[in-house]
Amino acid sequence: MTGSLLAVDLVNLAGTRWTVDAAQKTLREHQIRRAALTVSSSGQLRDWAVRLRSAFEDVDIDTRCRAINGLLEAGTARAYLTTHDQLRPHLHFASDDDDVVARVKAVTAGGLAIFAVESDGGRLGVCARIGCGTAFLDTSRNGLRSYCSARCGNNDAVQRHRKAAPKAEV
């Protein structure tokens, strides 16, 4: 799940106030090794994060699969199994010698592909509350999540209730 969780965080960071420091902090939180960013590499990474958003916005499974295939084509070189640093076996989609942007592209594209396979092409989304737009992975039991958080869901329900409630006459 590392790649798909990193993808969510990068997409959401790109939708807010992207800075080199914020991007670097996000990479560290996801244990991306050798994550030193320059202004240039940060900009490249932000462009990639904007592109990743397509996988979350597409609600049709075929369209989502095409979007993720495009990410795989642009972001991965080859897949291989590794056990570096005494970790359990896991997939890498780029060489350890690649720069941080190439490695992040690979891990996010590969992570989204694996997540899509395991979730039958669904469970990636963007919050349904108007004005929010936060991307999320739906890890709920029933897979029917429409909001990034309970708070957004509750706020939306209150707004719908207020619009539907008849106005009291004075």
Image (cartoon, rainbow, N blue to C red):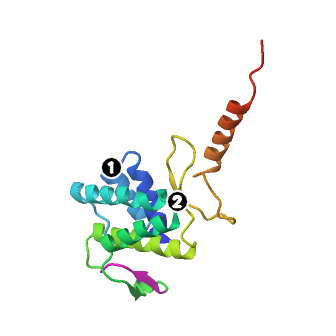
Residue farthest to the right, as pictured: 169
Q: What stretch is highlighted in magenta?
A: 89-95
Residue 159, percent across and down? 65, 35
What amino acid type should be assigned to the residue bearing mark 2?
Answer: Val
Res 19 label: 1
Name the residue: 29% across, 70% down: 102
Q: Tell me what residue is drawn at x 46 percent, y 65 percent.
A: 63
Q: In which quarter of the image is residue 155?
A: top right
Tell whether position 94 is magenta. yes
Left or right of 169? Residue 120 is: left
Nearest to the eye among marks 1 and 2: give it: 2
Q: 39 left or right of 73?
A: left
Of the pair 123 and 36, the residue shown nearer to us: 123
Question: Cα distance, mark 1 to mark 2?
Answer: 29 Å
At a point 53% along the width and 58% down the height, the residue shown is 125
Q: Where is residue 136 in the image (x, y as percent from the top left)?
A: 53, 58
Q: What element carries label 2?
A: loop
Horizontal side of residue 95 vs 56, given as left or right: left
Q: Is mark 1 on a helix, strand or loop?
A: loop
For disc 2, the marked residue is: 59
Residue 33 visible somewhere in the drawing = no
Viewer can see residue 158: yes
